[in-house]
Amino acid sequence: MDKVVKILIVEDEMVIAANISLQLSELGYEVTGILPRGEEAIAHIQIDKPDIVLLDIRLKGEMDGIETAHEIQKIYNIPIIYLTANADDAHFNRAKETHPYAFISKPFKKLDLQRAIELTVDRISIENDSENGIGNGNDLTNNGSATDFILNDRIFVRHNEKMLKIDIKDIYYIEADRNYCRIFSQGREYLLVMTLKDIDAKLPQNHFLRIHRSYIINISQIDEVAGTHVVIAKKAIPMSKAMRTELLKRLQTI
């Protein structure tokens, strides 16, 4: 996107909202408004349409953030990034129905905010290219869950309306980040709106093992096994005592 990206902040904690606004301005984005209520956000969007909405899940007005997102999407197809502090499963599952582009967990670092915005802007550009007929024509489309396509040597993760291929051999490890997770592979990092438990149930078990409540590893990528951790691509990943025995058994079968 060549033009300045316009972002609306919908957050009822004004100190947090002001801090976000400052950080976004420093990153070169235009903040179209800071609003504490979903009703106000909907009215604002009809006057000054932003490119992205940063939306707190637990707003205190008549509508919470998820209800606000549903109402926004009835009017415009605007990317939603949720701001959340300890969202429970019920809120997370409701939020998934609005197909958000990202979740940012509060409190968050400036880098978390920057990456979420950059990923969203990148996705907007890709979608615009696709709508304009730009692309290689090899994309798989699907309206299902994030990993509907799981083969022996690859998985496909949802990238809005497209499915992006990741070769299993290239995956190093997967890390839980509250109610979503990050896939670390050769040269890239992918953010999935899916819990580690859910993705663990879908991955081929002959390749992957959950060695800690926050980590799933690709067994074939292990460089070192220590008493309390393994090393993959220079990253020390913690390992529970119970899983160390299981890991050693699995390594003997490779």
Image (cartoon, grey):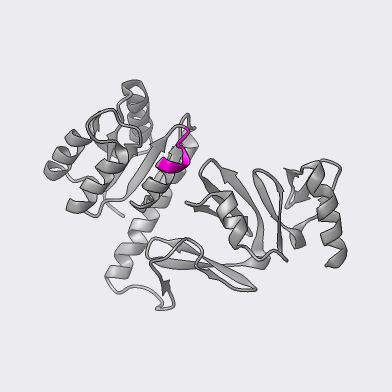
71 to the left or right of 101: left
156 to the left or right of 242: left
Residue at 39 percent across and 50 percent down: it is 96
Which percent across, then down, holds residue 1? Answer: 31, 55
Q: Residue furthest bottom?
A: 137
Q: Residue furthest top?
A: 15
Residue 88 is one of the magenta-drawn residues: yes
132 to the left or right of 108: left
How many marks the image carries: the answer is: 0
User: Could you tell me if residue 4 is visible in this image?
Assistant: no
Work out whether residue 88 or residue 254 is closer to the camera in this orientation and state it.
88
251 to the left or right of 151: right
Residue 113 is one of the magenta-drawn residues: no
User: Could you tell me if residue 199 is visible in this image?
Assistant: yes
Residue at 28 percent across and 34 percent down: it is 10
Magenta segment, prevailing SS (helix, strand or loop):
loop
Name which quarter of the figure residue 44 lies in.
Answer: top left
Compared to 149, does 198 lie above or below?
above
Compared to 36, does 218 lie above or below?
below
Which percent across, then down, holds residue 77? Answer: 24, 55
Residue at 38 percent across and 60 percent down: it is 160
Name which quarter of the figure residue 153 lies in.
Answer: bottom right
Stretch of the chain drawn in magenta: 86-90
Residue at 49 percent across and 37 percent down: it is 111
| Location of the C terminus (image quadrant) | bottom right
Which percent across, then down, holds residue 123? Answer: 38, 57
Which percent across, then down, holds residue 188? Answer: 57, 57
Q: Residue furthest left?
A: 47
